């Protein structure tokens, strides 16, 4: 444990010293992953997936706020949808505008979560998200998660629409494009089940994590992981939805492990040194429970310099 704590403190010190370099690099990498994944997931406009264009845009985003990556990602979705079908571009634009003006204008920093949900499907980490987001972000993550899930299933419906339009001899199917896409989303039981489960897991994980009993964070992560699996099992039976239980189980386990790792990075506490404090002012009594974090303090080293004088 001492070695791990020492390593953690070294990482914190290293990051605080070189934050002005590390932060732009991390934003640059994040932007490349987001833009590349979006272009490959939709893939209707290859010109947007040119390496030079992605690298140049990501380099600019490295020195701008993170929400700029989200805005550019929304633009990529609209452009790719327009190449697929003009009707899809209108739906995409409305979807992006609702998300921007209804959410991002008030909670700007967490808007990127919507795009990370889509990316998580590529790396098979989707079912790990609700446990991690439940304690890292909290209830404010629910809205971008819902938008991200809708975006994923919209992308699948858009692919089906393109195939239908390509097989249509006349333009009759094009008139029904709006209805085709919207009905595909509203009638998608798997999407609705995923939204309900993720919302419940995020809320329960957050509420337990905020409680004051000992090791509440461990209980929160384990409960969130188990609830993730149980709710999908119940939903698959009651809603007649086929789900990959093995993927859900593995994803939930990865989510619990990631949550534990992030919590260790944030700091773990020493419950043996818990103190209960009481004080008062003219209007209130205050009862405070103080629990110190485990840390490794640098040992004080005194170096004595001895100068030998030469005697003649």
Image: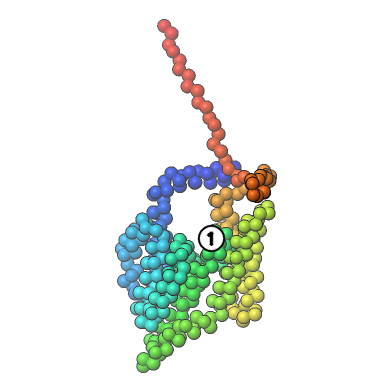
Relative image position of residue 61 (x, y in whole percent) = 36, 59
Residue receiving disc 1: 137
Quarter occupied by residue 112:
bottom left
Quarter occupied by residue 308:
top left
Relative image position of residue 71 (x, y in whole percent) = 39, 67
Relative image position of residue 33 (x, y in whole percent) = 41, 63
Relative image position of residue 192 (x, y in whole percent) = 56, 77
Q: Nearer the viewer, residue 307 or 96?
A: 96
Residue 43, compared with residue 264, is above or below; it is below
Q: Nearer the viewer, residue 247 or 88?
A: 88
The quadrant of the picture occupied by the N terminus is top right
State the residue at coordinates (65%, 79%): 237
In this rendering, would 50 be left or right of 116? left
State the residue at coordinates (67%, 48%): 285
The quadrant of the picture occupied by the C terminus is top left
Residue found farthest to the top: 312
Residue 28, compared with residue 13, is above or below; it is below
State the residue at coordinates (43%, 66%): 105
Give the image's coloring scheme: rainbow
Quarter occupied by residue 92:
bottom left
């Amino acid at each position: 444990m001492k070695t791990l704590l020492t390593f953690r403190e070294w990482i914190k010190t290293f990051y605080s010293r070189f934050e002005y370099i590390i932060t732009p690099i991390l934003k640059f990498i994040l932007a490349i992953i987001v833009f590349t994944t979006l272009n490959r997931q939709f893939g209707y406009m290859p010109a947007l997936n040119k390496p030079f264009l992605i690298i140049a845009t990501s380099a600019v985003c490295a020195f701008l706020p993170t929400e700029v990556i989200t805005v550019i990602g929304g633009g990529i979705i609209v452009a790719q949808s327009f190449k697929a079908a003009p009707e899809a571009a209108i739906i995409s634009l409305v979807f992006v505008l609702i998300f921007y003006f209804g959410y991002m204008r008030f909670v700007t920093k967490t808007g990127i979560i919507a795009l990370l949900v889509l990316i998580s499907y590529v790396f098979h980490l989707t079912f790990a998200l609700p446990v991690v987001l439940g304690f890292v972000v909290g209830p404010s993550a629910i809205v971008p998660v819902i938008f991200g899930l809708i975006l994923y299933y919209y992308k699948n419906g858009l692919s089906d629409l393109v195939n239908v339009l390509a097989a249509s001899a006349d333009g009759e199917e094009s008139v029904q494009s709006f209805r085709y896409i919207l009905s595909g989303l509203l009638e998608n039981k798997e999407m609705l089940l995923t939204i309900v489960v993720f919302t419940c897991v995020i809320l329960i994980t957050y509420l337990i994590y905020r409680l004051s009993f000992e090791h509440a964070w461990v209980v929160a992560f384990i409960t969130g992981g188990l609830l993730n699996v149980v709710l999908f099992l119940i939903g698959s039976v009651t809603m007649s939805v086929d789900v990959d239980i093995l993927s859900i189980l593995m994803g939930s386990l990865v989510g619990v492990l990631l949550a534990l790792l992030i919590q260790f990075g944030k700091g773990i506490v020493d419950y043996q040194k818990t103190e209960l404090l009481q004080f008062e002012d003219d209007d209130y009594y205050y009862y405070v429970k103080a629990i110190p974090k485990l840390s490794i303090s640098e040992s004080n080293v005194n170096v004595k310099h001895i100068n030998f004088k030469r005697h003649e």
